[in-house]
Image (cartoon, helix red, strand yellow):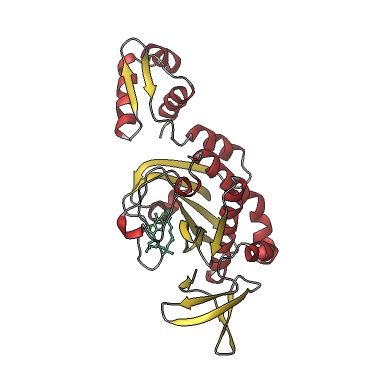
Amino acid sequence: MDEKAVYILKRLYEQDFVSGENLARELDVSRMAINKRIKSLQEMGFSITGCRKRGYQLVDKDIIRIWEIENFVSKSNLFEDFLFFDQINSTNSYIKENQEKLKSATVVYAERQTAGRGRLGRSWIDLEKGIKMSIFLSIDFIDIEKLVPLTLFTGLVVNRVLRTFKVNSFIKWSNDILINGKKVCGILTELLGELDGRGNVIIGIGLNVNATNLPEDILEIATTLKKEMGVSFDRTDIIIGILKEFEKEFENFKTRGFLPFRDEYKSYCANLEREIIINGEQKAFCKDIGQNGELICEQNGKELKIHSGEVTVRW
Ligand code: BT5
């Protein structure tokens, strides 16, 4: 979204009614140009109404405050760019397709995804008023071995932030955040290979926030923050919270790996001390999380380490 559109949104967010004349004057454009921009914001899904006497009004204020995220990113020591889309196939796919053009630490956000992806070809169902974003990082240390720890690290960051909002969330190894045993967030980490000698990685985060209706196919297994807590959440504050926490801890993760985060991860890990099912068939008892984030289990009296794959917890 360009600067002028973001400016209009900000004005409408901050003031109840804003006249077209004022917007035209403030942006030094014609009244017609404002009309056009309002129309395109409406087409993007922003609920803006016009009243001849009083001006424009943003009726639904549960929007992403793009200007605040841009401001945060402009001061960040890690993130270099923030791209907002009203609709896109998938934020992870967008990064894959455009990686050569992107700055080395870019956050891509989409209000709606038409082809959101989970792991192993599964899909991520698009819920309204959620958070769907991906962090693109071009870094020198990454290899396939580090992807699970990076997923775990991101899960820990999201869990930490949710807890600052008083949400009683837990982490299910390796990539889910649960509330009352139901999935509220999934993380999809992908390695893009090397470009100019550096490893490119995408960390996609899908978090269900303010939706109240879930489609039938995930009704039993999924939830949203609003459903669990009974109140709406400020999505912008959550996004900035996640990016801030990620930035704060990332240097430590880069230099020391998963180890400094292991105790905290363990204390919120839903799998520990429970029976789990691996890849839909093998049962095992989950005992510990290893130094590199691997799941340490016991099966028929023998120790079993799981580095990747599917794990189901029994509640
Ligand atoms: C995940 O995969 O949980 C990773 C999801 C990552 C989504 C983000 S959104 C931004 C970025 N762009 C993308 O295209 N993806 C990332 P997995 O562990 O494979 O779980 C997928 C399973 O979760 C599905 O098969 C469903 O059972 C369930 N599921 C699908 N949509 C869901 C939702 N909105 N909430 C909770 N569970 C869901």
In the rendered image, residue 124, in percent from the top left (x then y), is placed at: 37, 57
Name the residue nearer the viewer: 80 or 300. Answer: 300
Residue 103 lies, with reference to residue 72, above or below; the image says below
The quarter of the image holding the N terminus is top left
Name the residue nearer the viewer: 211 or 74. Answer: 211
In the rendered image, residue 308, in percent from the top left (x then y), is placed at: 50, 74
Report the residue at 49% width, 47% height from top. Answer: 107
Q: Is residue 306 left or right of residue 261?
A: left
Figure quarter occupied by ligand 1: bottom left
Residue 41 lies, with reference to residue 267, above or below; the image says above
Q: Residue furthest top?
A: 53
In the rendered image, residue 143, in percent from the top left (x then y), is placed at: 55, 68
Residue 31 sits in quarter: top left
In the rendered image, residue 32, in percent from the top left (x then y), is placed at: 30, 17
Q: Is residue 172 left or right of residue 253?
A: left
Q: Count numbered badges in the picture.
A: 0
| Residue 196 in view (yes/no) | no
